Image (spheres, rainbow, N blue to C red):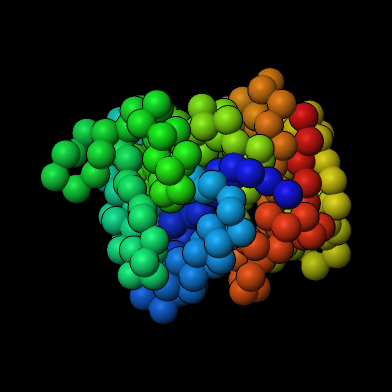
């Protein structure tokens, strides 16, 4: 159904419930799902978060300068990107890590035209270090890269199966939206993505699908057109 997609993976997802670090078994499951999508002929870019190591807005960074804390968070995403790249390459696929902060020994610098060329050649591209700027989350980086790569849709893989009227982990009678607009997300102040990312997607007509990573095969199902999670439209 989609020729090119941008997948947003949170750092917490890679920890698989442990809260800190990378779950080796789970990251190989994620790599296998990505390989299954690649086999369908879909070009894939991936943005990874770093919350399983460090978040610039977390409690542990409360006494730190925000710029320094955000840079630490960006470096955390590079750790996750390299781990995911290793898992993908073990399956025989070609994968490139492109970092918004230059570190030539471990990753290519992010250059849009080069990233587009990697995708056209069938390589999987992992975008690390967010946007390279403090005060911007990896959600915003995912929205930005989706637009730059001319993706057909932005896929946000989370621990819940869509967008709810309230946090389903805290409010038992919260109901799930089948479809919602970016304007409604902003109006209802739903904590799906930060407002910068939501506004960027809305203003550039980028659709988004929010779905659960907990069920194996969900990424391929979404790519194939199955109605999973919540579809967000401009």
Q: Nearer the viewer, residue 186 or 179?
A: 179
Quadrant of the snapshot with the C terminus = top right
Placement of 211 over or under 101, stated as above or below: below
Placement of 14 over or under 66, stated as above or below: below
On the image, the x and y values in percent for residue 119 come to: 46, 41
Image point (56%, 66%), residue name:
36
User: In the figure, is residue 187 to the left or right of 170?
Assistant: right
On the image, the x and y values in percent for residue 1 come to: 73, 49
User: In the figure, is residue 148 to the left or right of 113?
Assistant: right
User: In the figure, is residue 160 to the left or right of 78?
Assistant: right
Q: Residue furthest left?
A: 105
User: In the figure, is residue 99 to the left or right of 18?
Assistant: left
Query: Picture quarter containing residue 135?
Result: top left
Q: Is residue 77 at all visible to an observer of this figure?
A: no
Image point (79%, 60%), residue name:
226
Query: Picture quarter containing residue 82?
Result: bottom left
Image point (34%, 28%), residue name:
111
Q: Residue furthest top?
A: 203
Placement of 218 over or under 180, stated as above or below: below
Q: Is residue 35 at all visible to an observer of this figure?
A: yes
On the image, the x and y values in percent for residue 18 come to: 43, 73
Q: How many marks?
A: 0
On the image, the x and y values in percent for residue 202 come to: 70, 26
């Amino acid at each position: 159904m989609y020729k090119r997609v941008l997948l947003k993976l949170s750092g917490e997802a890679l920890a698989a419930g442990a809260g800190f670090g990378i779950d080796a078994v789970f990251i190989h499951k994620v790599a296998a799902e990505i390989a299954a999508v690649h086999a369908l002929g879909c070009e894939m870019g991936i943005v990874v978060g770093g919350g399983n190591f460090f978040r610039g807005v977390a409690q542990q960074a409360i006494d730190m300068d925000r710029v320094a804390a955000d840079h630490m968070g960006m470096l955390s995403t590079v750790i996750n990107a390299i781990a995911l790249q290793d898992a993908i390459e073990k399956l025989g696929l070609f994968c490139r890590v492109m970092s918004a902060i230059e570190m030539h020994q471990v990753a290519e610098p992010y250059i849009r035209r080069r990233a587009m060329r990697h995708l056209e050649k069938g390589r999987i591209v992992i975008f690390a270090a967010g946007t390279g700027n403090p005060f911007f989350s990896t959600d915003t980086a995912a929205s930005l890269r989706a637009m730059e790569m001319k993706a057909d849709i932005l896929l946000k893989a989370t621990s819940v199966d869509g967008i709810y009227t309230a946090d389903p982990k805290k409010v038992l009678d919260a109901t799930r939206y089948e479809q919602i607009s970016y304007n409604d997300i902003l109006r209802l102040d739903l904590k799906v993505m930060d407002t910068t990312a939501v506004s960027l997607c809305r203003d550039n007509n980028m659709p988004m699908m929010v779905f659960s990573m907990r069920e194996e095969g969900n990424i391929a199902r979404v790519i194939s057109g199955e109605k999973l999670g919540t579809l967000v439209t401009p």
